[in-house]
Amino acid sequence: MVFINCCGFPLYNLSRKWPLTIIAVNLYAVLVSAVITGQMLRRLFGKAGVWFVVLVTVVCSCMGLACRFLLEYGEVSNTYNFTVPNAVLHVVVFSAAVLFSWFVRKKRE
């Protein structure tokens, strides 16, 4: 989960215009990874509550963002990638996709 968030950030850049193909590929890769992660969390922590899954997802997402920040430390891209709206959008959308997948898997059991 940390690796996915490190490589997939920002999900959609609100502060800089990107080509549509880059947006589509990044969105697809991150959302598919979130769905797979949600199913894996359901299998790993089957009896855990929803708040535990949310906590694990948000913590791992923030760790991924921290790794990405350190990876690009000193580069100009940090100034327009690491804005508060970009970070919040990424964490919220990724966590919601993981949670949705977790609930779908729970219903199928």
Image (spheres, rainbow, N blue to C red):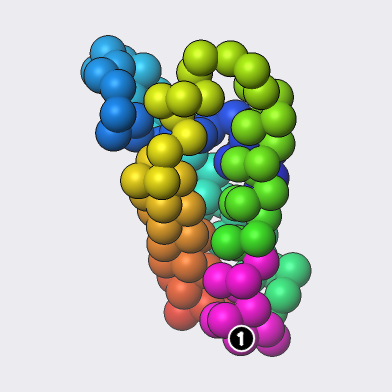
Q: Position of residue 10 (x, y in %)?
A: 45, 34
Taking the image as shown, residue 29 lies to the left or right of residue 22, namely: right
Farthest residue in the right direction? 44
Q: Dot 1 corresponds to which residue?
A: 49
Q: Was residue 59 drawn as part of the magenta stretch in this picture?
A: no
Magenta stretch holds residue 51: yes
Q: Position of residue 13 (x, y in %)?
A: 34, 30
Please report the residue visible at 67 percent of the width from the left and 55 percent of the height from the top. Answer: 60
Q: Please tell me which residue lies in front, 60 or 107.
A: 60
Q: Main secondary structure of the magenta part?
A: helix
The amino acid type of the residue labelled 1 equals Gly
The answer to whether residue 101 is seen in the rendering is: no
Q: Is residue 35 left or right of residue 53?
A: left
Q: Is residue 78 above or below residue 32?
A: above
Corner quadrant of residue 75: top right
Q: Residue at x 46, y 25 (%)?
A: 79
Query: Which residue occupies 41% across, 52% down?
Result: 88
Q: Quadrant of residue 27?
A: top left
Choose between 21 and 67: the one closer to the eye. 67
Q: Is 55 located above or below residue 30 in the figure? A: below
Tell me residue 68's x, y (percent). Answer: 64, 32
Secondary structure category for the residue under label 1:
loop
Question: How many labels, in total?
Answer: 1
* Residue 46 versus residue 19 in the image, above or below: below
Q: Which residues are magenta?
A: 47-56
Q: Quadrant of the C terminus?
A: bottom right
* Residue 51 visible here: yes
Query: Residue at horizontal 35%, vertical 46%?
Result: 85
* Residue 92 versus residue 49 in the image, above or below: above
Nearer to us in this view, 3 or 103: 3
